Image: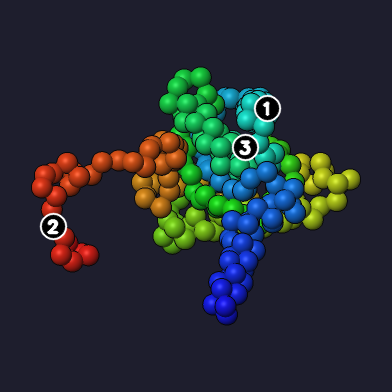
Amino acid sequence: MASEIDEREDSMLDNHRTSLLDYIEERNRTLNKKSLIHRVVYISKLRDEDIDRVEAGNYYERQLKNLQNVHQSEPVTGLMLIYMKHIVHVVETSSDMLLEMVKELHHSETSDEGFISKAKILVISHDIPQRLYQQWSFRTLDIEAHRLEAFEPSETTDKLIVDVLTQLLKLGKFISKTPKLNFKNAMDSLHQNVPEFLPQQAAIHYLLEEDDNCMMLPSEYINTYTKPFDTALHSDKVWPLPTRLFPYN
Protein backbone atom coordinates (compact mmCIF):
# COMPACT_ATOMS: atom_id res chain seq x y z
CA MET A 1 0.00 0.00 0.00
CA ALA A 2 2.80 2.40 0.90
CA SER A 3 4.61 1.66 -2.34
CA GLU A 4 1.48 2.46 -4.36
CA ILE A 5 1.16 5.83 -2.58
CA ASP A 6 4.84 6.59 -3.25
CA GLU A 7 4.45 5.76 -6.94
CA ARG A 8 1.35 7.96 -7.15
CA GLU A 9 3.19 10.87 -5.53
CA ASP A 10 6.16 10.41 -7.87
CA SER A 11 3.87 10.46 -10.91
CA MET A 12 2.21 13.66 -9.67
CA LEU A 13 5.61 15.29 -9.20
CA ASP A 14 6.66 14.25 -12.71
CA ASN A 15 3.52 15.80 -14.17
CA HIS A 16 4.22 19.15 -12.46
CA ARG A 17 7.99 19.19 -12.94
CA THR A 18 9.19 22.28 -14.82
CA SER A 19 11.60 21.62 -17.66
CA LEU A 20 14.11 24.01 -19.19
CA LEU A 21 11.87 24.37 -22.24
CA ASP A 22 8.94 25.34 -19.99
CA TYR A 23 11.12 27.96 -18.32
CA ILE A 24 12.28 29.43 -21.65
CA GLU A 25 8.75 29.56 -23.06
CA GLU A 26 7.43 31.20 -19.91
CA ARG A 27 10.20 33.78 -20.03
CA ASN A 28 9.42 34.54 -23.68
CA ARG A 29 5.73 35.00 -22.86
CA THR A 30 6.66 37.37 -20.04
CA LEU A 31 8.87 39.40 -22.39
CA ASN A 32 6.20 39.24 -25.14
CA LYS A 33 8.62 37.43 -27.43
CA LYS A 34 7.41 35.10 -30.17
CA SER A 35 10.78 33.38 -30.48
CA LEU A 36 14.37 33.59 -29.31
CA ILE A 37 16.28 36.73 -30.21
CA HIS A 38 19.76 36.52 -31.74
CA ARG A 39 22.31 39.18 -32.59
CA VAL A 40 24.63 39.20 -35.60
CA VAL A 41 27.39 41.70 -36.31
CA TYR A 42 28.87 41.79 -39.80
CA ILE A 43 31.15 44.11 -41.74
CA SER A 44 31.18 44.74 -45.48
CA LYS A 45 32.88 46.79 -48.16
CA LEU A 46 31.01 49.13 -50.47
CA ARG A 47 31.26 48.11 -54.10
CA ASP A 48 31.94 51.64 -55.33
CA GLU A 49 33.12 54.79 -53.56
CA ASP A 50 30.65 56.86 -55.60
CA ILE A 51 27.62 54.96 -54.26
CA ASP A 52 24.89 57.10 -52.74
CA ARG A 53 25.24 55.95 -49.13
CA VAL A 54 21.88 57.35 -48.08
CA GLU A 55 20.22 55.38 -50.86
CA ALA A 56 22.11 52.28 -49.69
CA GLY A 57 20.74 52.75 -46.16
CA ASN A 58 17.21 53.27 -47.47
CA TYR A 59 17.56 50.12 -49.57
CA TYR A 60 18.46 47.98 -46.55
CA GLU A 61 15.63 49.54 -44.55
CA ARG A 62 13.11 48.59 -47.25
CA GLN A 63 14.64 45.13 -47.51
CA LEU A 64 14.30 44.44 -43.78
CA LYS A 65 10.69 45.68 -43.78
CA ASN A 66 9.83 43.42 -46.71
CA LEU A 67 11.40 40.40 -44.99
CA GLN A 68 9.50 41.15 -41.80
CA ASN A 69 6.21 41.44 -43.68
CA VAL A 70 6.80 38.07 -45.33
CA HIS A 71 7.89 36.12 -42.25
CA GLN A 72 5.75 37.86 -39.60
CA SER A 73 8.46 37.20 -37.05
CA GLU A 74 10.20 39.18 -34.35
CA PRO A 75 10.86 42.86 -35.11
CA VAL A 76 14.27 43.77 -36.49
CA THR A 77 16.35 46.15 -34.38
CA GLY A 78 19.92 47.29 -34.76
CA LEU A 79 22.21 49.89 -36.26
CA MET A 80 23.97 50.23 -39.60
CA LEU A 81 27.01 52.50 -39.73
CA ILE A 82 27.86 53.47 -43.32
CA TYR A 83 31.39 54.78 -43.64
CA MET A 84 32.98 56.19 -46.77
CA LYS A 85 34.05 52.73 -47.97
CA HIS A 86 32.68 50.22 -45.43
CA ILE A 87 29.58 49.18 -43.50
CA VAL A 88 29.27 47.93 -39.93
CA HIS A 89 25.88 46.36 -39.23
CA VAL A 90 24.38 45.10 -35.96
CA VAL A 91 21.10 43.17 -36.32
CA GLU A 92 18.85 41.71 -33.61
CA THR A 93 15.95 39.46 -34.59
CA SER A 94 14.83 35.82 -34.84
CA SER A 95 16.87 33.06 -36.47
CA ASP A 96 14.69 32.76 -39.59
CA MET A 97 14.95 36.49 -40.25
CA LEU A 98 18.72 36.41 -39.78
CA LEU A 99 19.03 33.55 -42.25
CA GLU A 100 17.01 35.40 -44.89
CA MET A 101 19.02 38.55 -44.26
CA VAL A 102 22.33 36.70 -44.71
CA LYS A 103 20.98 35.15 -47.93
CA GLU A 104 20.26 38.63 -49.26
CA LEU A 105 23.72 39.71 -48.12
CA HIS A 106 25.34 36.82 -49.96
CA HIS A 107 23.31 37.59 -53.11
CA SER A 108 24.39 41.22 -52.97
CA GLU A 109 28.00 40.15 -52.49
CA THR A 110 28.10 37.72 -55.41
CA SER A 111 26.04 39.69 -57.94
CA ASP A 112 26.58 43.02 -59.64
CA GLU A 113 23.27 44.41 -58.37
CA GLY A 114 24.11 44.96 -54.71
CA PHE A 115 25.88 47.75 -52.88
CA ILE A 116 28.66 45.62 -51.39
CA SER A 117 31.50 43.53 -52.77
CA LYS A 118 32.71 41.67 -49.68
CA ALA A 119 31.25 40.77 -46.27
CA LYS A 120 32.26 38.87 -43.13
CA ILE A 121 30.36 37.93 -39.99
CA LEU A 122 32.20 38.83 -36.79
CA VAL A 123 29.93 37.24 -34.18
CA ILE A 124 26.61 35.44 -33.70
CA SER A 125 25.09 35.79 -30.23
CA HIS A 126 22.25 33.33 -29.60
CA ASP A 127 19.32 33.87 -27.21
CA ILE A 128 20.37 37.30 -26.02
CA PRO A 129 18.65 38.29 -22.75
CA GLN A 130 17.53 41.68 -24.04
CA ARG A 131 17.86 43.87 -27.09
CA LEU A 132 20.64 46.40 -27.26
CA TYR A 133 18.74 48.60 -29.71
CA GLN A 134 15.05 49.52 -29.57
CA GLN A 135 14.69 50.12 -33.31
CA TRP A 136 16.58 49.74 -36.57
CA SER A 137 18.28 52.75 -38.08
CA PHE A 138 21.27 53.71 -40.18
CA ARG A 139 23.69 56.61 -40.15
CA THR A 140 26.25 57.77 -42.69
CA LEU A 141 29.61 58.82 -41.24
CA ASP A 142 31.59 61.36 -43.23
CA ILE A 143 34.92 60.44 -41.69
CA GLU A 144 37.89 60.37 -44.04
CA ALA A 145 40.40 57.60 -43.48
CA HIS A 146 43.83 57.68 -45.08
CA ARG A 147 46.25 54.84 -45.77
CA LEU A 148 43.90 52.02 -44.87
CA GLU A 149 46.28 49.48 -46.40
CA ALA A 150 49.07 50.58 -44.06
CA PHE A 151 47.17 49.60 -40.92
CA GLU A 152 49.08 47.02 -38.87
CA PRO A 153 47.42 45.97 -35.60
CA SER A 154 49.51 45.37 -32.52
CA GLU A 155 47.24 42.50 -31.45
CA THR A 156 45.82 39.30 -32.87
CA THR A 157 42.78 39.22 -35.16
CA ASP A 158 40.44 37.76 -32.56
CA LYS A 159 41.48 40.43 -30.04
CA LEU A 160 40.84 43.12 -32.67
CA ILE A 161 37.36 41.69 -33.25
CA VAL A 162 36.67 41.78 -29.51
CA ASP A 163 37.69 45.44 -29.45
CA VAL A 164 35.31 46.26 -32.32
CA LEU A 165 32.44 44.38 -30.66
CA THR A 166 33.13 46.13 -27.35
CA GLN A 167 32.87 49.50 -29.08
CA LEU A 168 29.54 48.53 -30.62
CA LEU A 169 28.16 47.32 -27.29
CA LYS A 170 29.15 50.58 -25.63
CA LEU A 171 27.62 52.49 -28.53
CA GLY A 172 24.36 50.58 -28.14
CA LYS A 173 24.32 51.28 -24.41
CA PHE A 174 24.90 54.99 -25.08
CA ILE A 175 22.04 55.08 -27.60
CA SER A 176 19.68 53.21 -25.27
CA LYS A 177 20.20 55.87 -22.60
CA THR A 178 19.54 58.74 -25.01
CA PRO A 179 16.16 60.48 -24.41
CA LYS A 180 13.70 60.12 -27.27
CA LEU A 181 13.48 63.88 -27.72
CA ASN A 182 17.24 64.07 -28.38
CA PHE A 183 17.51 60.77 -30.25
CA LYS A 184 17.84 62.18 -33.79
CA ASN A 185 20.38 64.82 -32.80
CA ALA A 186 22.41 62.26 -30.87
CA MET A 187 22.43 59.85 -33.82
CA ASP A 188 23.43 62.57 -36.27
CA SER A 189 26.40 63.59 -34.13
CA LEU A 190 27.82 60.23 -33.05
CA HIS A 191 31.24 61.03 -34.50
CA GLN A 192 31.34 64.18 -32.36
CA ASN A 193 29.84 62.91 -29.11
CA VAL A 194 31.25 59.37 -28.87
CA PRO A 195 34.03 58.92 -31.44
CA GLU A 196 35.68 56.35 -29.16
CA PHE A 197 32.65 54.04 -29.63
CA LEU A 198 32.91 54.02 -33.44
CA PRO A 199 35.08 51.25 -34.94
CA GLN A 200 38.04 52.51 -36.95
CA GLN A 201 37.72 52.22 -40.70
CA ALA A 202 41.29 50.95 -40.91
CA ALA A 203 40.45 48.10 -38.52
CA ILE A 204 37.35 47.18 -40.58
CA HIS A 205 39.41 47.22 -43.77
CA TYR A 206 42.05 44.99 -42.16
CA LEU A 207 39.47 42.44 -40.97
CA LEU A 208 37.85 42.26 -44.39
CA GLU A 209 41.18 41.62 -46.09
CA GLU A 210 42.51 39.24 -43.43
CA ASP A 211 41.95 35.52 -44.03
CA ASP A 212 41.23 34.25 -40.52
CA ASN A 213 38.98 31.37 -39.44
CA CYS A 214 37.63 33.33 -36.48
CA MET A 215 35.36 35.17 -38.93
CA MET A 216 32.56 33.57 -40.94
CA LEU A 217 31.61 34.21 -44.54
CA PRO A 218 27.90 34.61 -45.45
CA SER A 219 28.11 31.44 -47.56
CA GLU A 220 29.41 29.48 -44.56
CA TYR A 221 26.55 30.77 -42.39
CA ILE A 222 24.01 29.70 -45.02
CA ASN A 223 25.54 26.23 -45.35
CA THR A 224 25.55 25.78 -41.58
CA TYR A 225 21.86 26.57 -41.18
CA THR A 226 20.44 25.04 -44.37
CA LYS A 227 22.31 21.77 -44.85
CA PRO A 228 20.50 18.68 -43.51
CA PHE A 229 21.83 16.92 -40.42
CA ASP A 230 21.18 13.39 -41.65
CA THR A 231 24.41 13.08 -43.62
CA ALA A 232 25.77 9.61 -44.29
CA LEU A 233 29.30 8.88 -43.12
CA HIS A 234 31.69 6.69 -45.12
CA SER A 235 31.71 4.14 -42.31
CA ASP A 236 27.93 3.78 -42.64
CA LYS A 237 28.35 2.50 -46.22
CA VAL A 238 30.77 -0.32 -45.31
CA TRP A 239 29.60 -3.89 -44.73
CA PRO A 240 30.13 -5.56 -42.40
CA LEU A 241 30.02 -2.66 -39.97
CA PRO A 242 33.40 -1.92 -38.35
CA THR A 243 33.75 -3.08 -34.77
CA ARG A 244 34.68 -0.37 -32.31
CA LEU A 245 36.09 -1.79 -29.13
CA PHE A 246 36.99 1.57 -27.62
CA PRO A 247 35.31 5.00 -27.83
CA TYR A 248 38.36 6.60 -29.45
CA ASN A 249 38.64 4.07 -32.29
Q: Residue at x 54, y 32 (%)?
A: 100
In the visual, does 236 lie left or right of 158?
left
Q: Position of residue 142 (x, y in %)?
A: 66, 38
Instruction: Give residue 243's mark.
Output: 2
Q: What residue type is labelled 1?
A: Asn
One can see residue 222 in this view? yes
Q: Residue flagged by tag 3: what amino acid is it? A: Ile
- Residue sticking out furthest to the left: 240
CA neighbours of label 3 inside 10 A, class few (<14), some (14 to 19), many (20+): many
Which residue type does callout 2 highlight? Answer: Thr
For residue 71, which quarter of the picture? top right
What's the distance in space between the residues labelled 1 and 3, CA to CA?
25 Å
For label 3, the SS is strand
> For mark 1, what is the residue?
69
Number of the front mark, 3 or 2: 2
Q: Neighbour class for label 2 at 10 Å: few (<14), some, many (≥20)?
A: few
Query: Sequence-wise, which precedes: disc 1 or disc 3?
Result: 1
- CB under 8 Å between discs 1 and 3: no
Q: Name the residue under label 3.
A: 82
Q: Distance between the residues labelled 1 and 2?
A: 53 Å
Question: Viewer-nearest of labels 1 and 2?
Answer: 2
What residue do we see at 17% from left, 41% from top? 237
Please identify, in this view, whether the residue under mark 1 or under mark 3 is nearer the observer.
Answer: 1
Q: Quadrant of the rendered structure where residue 156 is?
A: bottom left
Where residue 140 appears, as percent x and y from the top left, is 67, 36
The quarter of the image holding the C terminus is bottom left
Which secondary structure lies at badge 1? helix
Please give the name of the residue rendered at 63% of the width and 42% of the height, measured from the top-left corner: 93
Judge left or right: residue 112 versus residue 4.
left
Q: Earlier in the sequence, mark 1 or mark 2?
A: 1
